[in-house]
Amino acid sequence: MDQKPIFIEMSLKSWNAQVKSTNKLLDELSDEALLYEVSPGRNRVIYILGHLIAVHDNLLPLLGFGERLFPSFGEIFITSPDKSSHIFPPVSELRENWKELNSVLSAHFERMSTDEWFSKHAAVSQADFEKDPTRNKLNVLLNRTAHLAYHLGQMILVKGSVKD
Amino acid sequence: MDQKPIFIEMSLKSWNAQVKSTNKLLDELSDEALLYEVSPGRNRVIYILGHLIAVHDNLLPLLGFGERLFPSFGEIFITSPDKSSHIFPPVSELRENWKELNSVLSAHFERMSTDEWFSKHAAVSQADFEKDPTRNKLNVLLNRTAHLAYHLGQMILVKGSVKD
């Protein structure tokens, strides 16, 4: 059995902790609560959830795991803002997509070798990577962990809302 | 000159990126905007700023750098919720405290050796640390980076508010 270096273990623990907190929040929020804005005039929780799915789905090609599972989501949840003319998938479907994607990503993460974690991700050129070897796959995980925490801090604001 | 291992460099870059984004936001927000709630009935930006100062101030003893700079903040900004009976320091003072603390922490972080980063922090016993060596100082940095991102995601919601 491959013994993971401690910093990879720590990075994965940090990612998993944010995913777990997000799952816990989503379990606590009703489908109706997912339609609330996190603050007046700001994004709705459903948009943020779709955005997280789209951004995490991009990890599949970025980290060399394969094709996106939800290729249409980038246009709806990254390129377009909330309350665009796009029709969103139903809340129940997004909840399932989120879970499915997490388990696919987890399986890939667990299988990765140390050398793979420190290899270049797909969005950086070989020349740029040689100039700055921190632009590796583990760094993408650290950045996406902070990105998830950022949006979790927003989604949690609707919890216990009077409308909920 | 000590060459930092790449994962320490990555962890510090991730921390610095969140601090930089927070500084940028604080520079953009008026003193009045800091008194807004991030969402109706939720914490005000000023409380979150005080909370971040208090939590980061705790890093000084936790990582073995010395005594807290603002020992009274824990009671006001961690133990107590926002809108308690506590009188907050003036906004201008909190802005200065935040900057001062960041530069003190940065100076300590830059000086730390790899062994120090992987040594136990002050809140874990030697026995527990031996059972789980991920409970080290670098792990605290990763956790606080996510904690900062979480609250940054909230504070940014008042940006461009109609009242601002």
Image: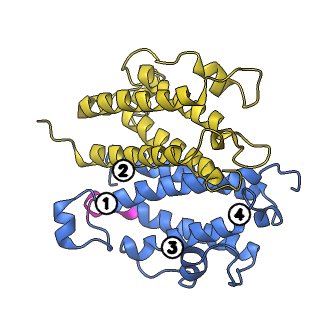
Chain colours: A blue, B yellow
For marks 4 and 1 on the same chain, the one whose residue lies earlier in the sequence: 4
Mark 2 belongs to which subunit? A
Name which of mark 3 and mark 4 comes first in the sequence. Answer: 4
Q: Secondary structure at mark 4?
A: helix
Chain of the residue under the numbered disc 4 shown in the image: A
**For mark 3, what is the residue?**
A57
Residue B82 on image: x %, y %? 72, 31
Magenta residues span A111-119
Could you tell me how far apart the alpha carbons at marks 1 and 3 are, in whole angstroms?
A: 18 Å
- Contact flag, marks 3 and 4 (Cβ < 8 Å): no
Spatial separation of the CA atoms under disc 4 and disc 1: 31 Å
Badge 2 element = helix
- Mark 2 or 4, which is nearer the eye? 4
Secondary structure, mark 1, is helix
Q: Which mark is residue A117?
A: 1
Q: Is residue A85 left or right of residue B118?
A: right
- What is the x, y in percent for residue B150? 57, 47
Say what amino acid the circle numbered 4 marks.
Val
Q: Which residue is mark 4?
A: A45
- Say which of marks 3 and 2 sits in front: 3
Sort mark 4 into few (<14), some (14-19) or many (20+) by Cα contacts within 10 Å: many
- State the SS at label 3: helix
Q: Position of residue A15 (x, y in %)?
A: 49, 53
Q: CA distance from mark 3 to mark 4?
A: 18 Å
Q: Which is closer to the viewer, label 3 or label 4?
A: 4
User: What's under tag 1, amino acid-wise?
Assistant: Trp
